[in-house]
Each structure stands twice: as C-alpha cells, then as structure tokens.
C-alpha cells in the first residue's frame, strides 16, 4: 500500500506551496555525474508519461502514483543506487519527498511518441527542455530515438534530437540518447534488437548535434554486445528492457555486458521496480552488485 502520509505531503505541497518545488530543486545536494572509476546505477521512471504503464501481464501496473513513488523511494535509498531518470512530474514528487539529495537526476525530454499511437515515431519533445534541465540543476537529458526508414516521421524526431544534443551541450549537460532501428508489425511499432540494427542506430545517434562531447548512449543488452560496442567511442549505459524473462537470465545478461569496455553502468526501470516477487530492495541490491561488484551493498 502507498505511504499515505508521503502522498498527502506531495499533494498538499502541489496544491498549497507549488513554489516549494523549485526551492527544493535549487537547494538539492548534487554530486558529480561520474567520479573516476565509478559506474552508474540509475532507475528509469519515465514510462508513464508515454502511456506505457504495463508490467508483464498487468496493463496498469504503474498507474498507481503513490505505489510507484513508494517503490522509487525504497530503490533510491538502497546502497550504491546513484539516481533516477524521470519526467518532471516524478522528479518533482521525489524532490518534495527529499529522495533526490546527493543523487544523479536525468530528465526525460521527448514523451510525445505515445505508446501504440499512429504518430509514435514523431516523438515530440513534450517534457523537459535543455534550459529547464539546467535551471532545475539536473545532470542531463534523455531522449528516445526510434528510426524507421519507411516512416517519414523519423526525420522530425532526428532533427529534434539533434537540436536537443546541441542545446544540452551548451549547458554542459549530458545528452543521453536511446536509439533503436524500428519498424511496424501489424501496425504496431517494434524495435529491432539484432546486433546489426543496434550498431546502425549507434552510428546515427552519435552524429547528432553540433558536438558529441556530452553525448552518451543508452543501449539494450543484445547478442554480440562486444561487436555492438565497437561501433562507438561514446560512453554507454545499458538499459534494463522489459521484464519478460526470468530474473536470473536477465541478471546474467547484464553482468556479462557490464564487463565490456565502454560500458559505464545500468539504467533499469520496471524490471527492478516491479519484480515478480515484489521485493524491490532485493532486486535493486542484486543489480547494484553487478554494477559495483565488491561495493555498494
């Protein structure tokens, strides 16, 4: 059950003291994104804003905001967890709850490609922009880039992502691109997770913007990751993906990929926040131990 007192605090702050949110952001204790030798363990919580609320066979698993916040607060408090990637609504809820002190915070930028919509590839920047990320003291912005060579909407998203990379770099903020080659199957958009497709997506994403000095890639764990990582010199974070398989198999794939050169950590959402047994702390601790063996937990 959601923490009733915490949820009431968030709701009352939003209704009666909205200015307190900006104040909490301004006074939040920050930390370096990546210290020498460190790897990042980040939580992803930007799915709801794109209408993607399902986890496994529950289509509304992430719909209860109080429960989601509870799970995030528990996960963020675990040793070795560095921070979160989220949309403004969730970042601000967590700010009110004091859960982001000393944490890395990345803002999700383009959430207009609503899950299942006919315009999913025209992924408009409806959330954070670069100026807002800098103003609120966030560490960078994340953008989803799905590329369908048969869909003209792809070019608008490419252009918008390129502009965002340039603007984030001007503020010396990380631009984290999550690129996929994609295509429609019976009208539904599907990401191509074959190694050649991931390599091609890396090449396209790396060339966006007037500089790639602050660009990172967020990549799926696929077969032949060694070959995939030869396609870029940009820092890479691994994404957890949809939690469909057995947790043991997922953790084993993460562990293998984390050992590769150029990989600087893990960004996981539903697989850790909604584990099959419901034990968020245990799932987070296992993943953190893979990212930071011998430390964190």
Image: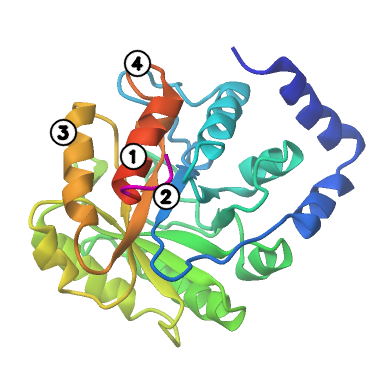
Residue 126 seen = no
Give the number of the mark in front: 3 or 1: 1
Q: What range is drawn magenta here?
A: 293-297
* Front residue (pair 241, 77): 77
**At 23% from the left edge and 75% from the top edge, which residue is drawn?**
232
The local secondary structure at tag 4 comes to: loop
Contact (Cβ within 8 Å) of mark 1 with mark 4: no
CB within 8 Å, label 2 to label 3: no
Upstream in sequence: badge 3 or badge 4: 3
**Nearer the N terminus, badge 3 or badge 1?**
3
Mark 4 lies on residue: 277
Q: State the separation of the CA atoms marked 2 and 3.
A: 19 Å
Which quadrant would the C terminus be assigned to in this image?
top left
Neighbours of disc 1 within 10 Å: few (<14), some (14-19), many (20+): many
From where the camera sits, is residue 49 visible?
yes
Residues under labels 1 and 4: Cα distance? 15 Å
| Residue 187 spot, x, y in % from top left | 24, 41
Residue occupying the point 42% across, 68% down: 156
Q: State yes or no: discs 1 and 2 in contact (Cβ < 8 Å).
A: yes
**Prevailing secondary structure class for the magenta stretch in the rendered image:** loop
Q: Quadrant of residue 147?
A: bottom left
Q: Which mark is residue 249?
A: 3
Picture layout, residue 155 above or below residue 182: below
Residue 287: give its label.
Answer: 1
Q: Estimate the spatial distance between the alpha carbons at disc 3 and disc 4, rounded to whole Å.
A: 16 Å
| Chain-order first, disc 1 or disc 2 | 2
- Give the spatial CA distance, label 2 vs label 4: 21 Å
* Residue position for label 2: 41
Q: Residue furthest front?
A: 294
């Amino acid at each position: 059950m959601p923490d009733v007192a915490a949820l009431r605090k968030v709701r009352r702050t939003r209704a009666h003291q909205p200015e307190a949110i900006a104040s909490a952001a301004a006074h939040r204790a920050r930390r370096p994104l990546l210290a020498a030798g460190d790897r990042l363990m980040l939580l992803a919580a930007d799915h709801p804003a794109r209408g993607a609320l399902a986890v496994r066979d529950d289509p509304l698993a992430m719909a209860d905001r109080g429960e989601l916040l509870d799970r995030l607060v528990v996960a963020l408090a675990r040793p070795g967890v560095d921070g979160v990637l989220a949309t403004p609504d969730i970042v601000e809820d967590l700010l009110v709850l004091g859960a982001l002190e000393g944490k890395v915070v990345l803002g999700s930028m383009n959430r207009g490609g609503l899950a299942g919509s006919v315009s999913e590839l025209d992924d408009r920047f409806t959330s954070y922009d670069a100026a807002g990320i800098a103003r609120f003291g966030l560490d960078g912005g994340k953008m989803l880039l799905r590329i369908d060579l048969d869909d003209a909407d792809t070019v608008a998203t490419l252009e918008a992502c390129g502009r965002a990379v340039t603007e984030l770099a001007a503020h010396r903020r990380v631009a984290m691109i999550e690129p996929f080659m994609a295509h429609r199957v019976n009208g539904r958009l599907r990401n191509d997770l074959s190694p050649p497709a991931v390599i091609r997506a890396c090449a396209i994403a790396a060339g966006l913007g007037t500089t790639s000095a602050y660009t990172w890639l967020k990549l799926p764990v696929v077969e032949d990751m060694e070959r995939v990582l030869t396609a870029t010199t940009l820092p890479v974070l691994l994404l957890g993906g949809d939690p469909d398989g057995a947790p043991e198999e997922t953790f084993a794939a993460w562990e293998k990929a984390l050992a590769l050169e150029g990989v600087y950590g893990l960004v996981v959402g539903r697989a850790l926040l909604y584990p099959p047994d419901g034990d968020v702390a245990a799932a987070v601790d296992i993943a953190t131990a893979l990212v930071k063996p011998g430390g964190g937990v």
